[in-house]
Every structure is written in C-alpha cells, then in structure tokens.
Image (cartoon, grey):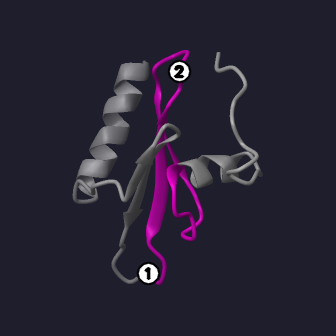
Amino acid sequence: MHDRANRARERFLTLLGNPQPVHEDSAGSLYRIPLPDEREPLVVVRLTNPSTGRVLFLRVPPTAQTAREAVAWTFGMNPEDWGPIRET
C-alpha cells in the first residue's frame, strides 16, 4: 500500500515538470512550483517518515524559505523551536 502511495507522489512531481528542490536539509526538501494562471507558486516540503519510510508531500505557505521552516510550520512552530526529540 505504501509503495503505491509513494509512487503516486513521485508521479505527481513528475507531472509537474519534475521540479528540483530549492532547499534541502535534514528536515526534508522544499519545492517551489510555478503554476500557470496562479499568483502564488505551489510550495511543498517532501519528507520521509523515519519509522515507516513513507514519503510525504505537505503543502506549506509560499513564504517558506527552508525545508526546516516548512516542516516547523506544519506543527505551528518556528524553525528555531522545532526539532523532534525522538522520531518513532
């Protein structure tokens, strides 16, 4: 099941023109994808769940500049304050 979902997510990026990450760090990879006829780009962070290996793509605000900032935002935190104590 997870393999199929991961393939679907990778296909999603391929359909968007196989964008390259604009930033990568230990939190993940940040993608900024211009969309035709839209004012703001699609901005997503790609991360891997360490316990399952599942790849996730999470939409984040277009103001995100780093993957860490993007992941922290998903938890309602500042990047300076975010950091998992233990990943399970």
Disc 2 residue crowd, few under 14, some 14–19, many 20+, Cα 10 Å:
few
Q: Which mark is residue 58?
A: none
- At a point 36% along the width and 21% down the height, the residue shown is 3
Q: Position of residue 48 (x, y in %)?
A: 48, 30
Q: Is residue 51 magenta?
A: yes
Nearest the eye: 67 or 35: 67
Q: In the image, is 61 to the left or to the right of 46?
A: right
Reply above or below: 36 against 60. Answer: below
Reply above or below: 23 against 35. Answer: above
Nearest the eye: 24 or 5: 24
The secondary structure type at the circle numbered 1 is loop
Disc nearer the start of the sequence (2/1): 1
Measured in 3D between alpha carbons, the distance from the residue under mark 2 to the one under mark 1, in whole angstroms, is 34 Å
Per the rendered image, the range of residues in magenta is: 38-67
* Residue position marked by numbered label 2 in the rendering: 50
- At a point 73% along the width and 54% down the height, the residue shown is 78
Q: In what quadrant of the picture does the N terminus appear? A: top left
Q: In what quadrant of the picture does the C terminus appear? A: top right
The kind of residue tagged 2 is Pro
- At a point 40% along the width and 30% down the height, the residue shown is 5
* Residue position marked by numbered label 1 in the rendering: 38
- Could you tell me if the residues under marks 2 and 1 are in contact, i.e. CB atoms within 8 Å? no
The kind of residue tagged 1 is Glu
Give the number of the mark in front: 2 or 1.
2
Disc 1 residue crowd, few under 14, some 14–19, many 20+, Cα 10 Å:
few
Q: Position of residue 11 (x, y in %)?
A: 28, 43
Q: Position of residue 83 (x, y in %)?
A: 69, 36
Q: Residue furthest front?
A: 80
